[in-house]
Image (spheres, helix red, strand yellow):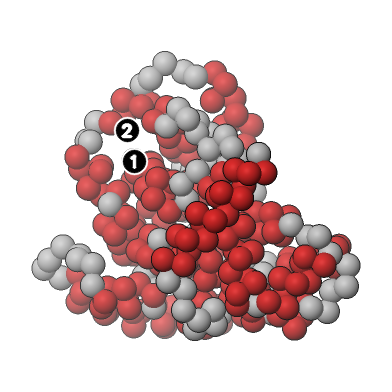
Amino acid sequence: MDVPDFGSDEERVARVDEYGFERPAGIDAEELVSDYQAVLSRRAIKWRKLLQGSRLQRSLKVKRYIRKGIPNEYRSLIWMTVSGAQGQMENNPTYYKKLLEMEEDTKLVESIRTDINRTFPDNVQFRRTTNPSFLQPLFNVLVAYGNHNKTIGYCQGMNFVAGYLLIVTKDEEKSFWLLDSLIKKIVPDFYSPTMIGLKTDQEVLGHLVRLKVPAVAELMERHNVMWTLVVSRWFICLFIDILPVETVLRIWDCLFYEGSKITFRVALTLIKYHQASILEANNFPAICEKFKQITRGPLVQDCHGFMKKIFTEPGRLPLTVITKLREISGAQLDDQS
């Protein structure tokens, strides 16, 4: 797929970032780009050497490299490889095309069309006036997935996830297979009709906050604030439109390699780091406002520093603990229903 032309380098830096998002007013774009580019250039040299000659294998070295960030020119390749999406695509070479050729599901198509035009209004690549635009490829990916997984079909939030995949891969078929891998392995039942996976993980976060940041848990309970009210968008969109673009992509680098416990590390880091600020709230609306505030500011804008913190701030977070808490939370939700 062709990449939209955003103008000269100078115009591009001033107007939009490399992913097509308009830069917020007041941001020193040139300084932001040059500082981060210097870091990425050093990482790119290391990645180039790592990828020479052999297929990428899971190892502590690869895990360390991914935690330090994947340069954008290698991101699509690494995501496809470590998620298993590349293998799926190679083993099913005509499957995506066949999904698009299936008889139209009117209800599915109408649901997708309703959301398509609301996808990333601040990104020039998702505008009909841009040539080429990502809107048609996004529509295709979502229709293909709906035909592939009839149980889920389409759910609000999937358009943003698929949109990010298109921004990185610039390829419909790759985006489809990554979306399939993400939903199957990392956020199972987040987008199902009952959203039981989403509800369960929100409850798991509540349990983890009681263990790691008990004062915040006590505040939430005292004011009857349900976790779904303050973190549902964090989970369902995997921090898209919650945290800065580069920070989200760095989170996704780790998510594809290490799985869903990364979402808990991110959420716990935001809550624990800002504990003092959250505890200043003394009523329901103030608590909700605090949870909006903690996703903004210097902590999350510095994606390098933030990614270091998610592996230190929450402390140990074994998968066995998360699995056990999912069992407990799932049982509690079953009892409630």
Q: CA distance from mark 2 to mark 1?
A: 6 Å
Q: Which residue is mark 2?
A: 96
Specify few, some or many for label 1: CA neighbours under 10 Å numbering under 14, 14-19, or 20 or more: many
State which tag comes first along the sequence, 2 or 1: 2
**Number of marks in the image?**
2
Taking depth in this image into account, of 169 and 253 the one nearest to the observer is: 253
Residue 38 vs 87, above or below: the answer is below
Taking depth in this image into account, of 207 and 113 the one nearest to the observer is: 207
Report if the CB atoms under discs 2 and 1 are less than 8 Å apart.
yes
- What residue is rendered at 67% in x and 44% in y? 336
**Image location of residue 19, percent across then percent down:** 50, 59
The image quarter in which residue 292 lies: bottom right
Q: Amino acid at mark 2?
A: Tyr
Furthest residue toward right: 283
Is residue 235 among the parts visible in the rendering?
A: no
Is residue 63 among the parts visible in the rendering?
A: yes
Q: Which residue is mark 1?
A: 173
- What residue is rendered at 53% in x and 34% in y? 154
- What residue is rendered at 57% in x and 34% in y? 193
- What residue is rendered at 43% in x and 53% in y? 186
**Image location of residue 171, percent across then percent down:** 36, 45
**Image location of residue 191, percent across then percent down:** 54, 41
Furthest residue toward top: 103
Q: Amino acid at mark 1?
A: Glu
Specify few, some or many for label 2: CA neighbours under 10 Å numbering under 14, 14-19, or 20 or more: many
**Image location of residue 294, percent across then percent down:** 70, 73
Secondary structure of the residue carrying tag 1 is: helix
* Quarter of the image where the C terminus is located: top right
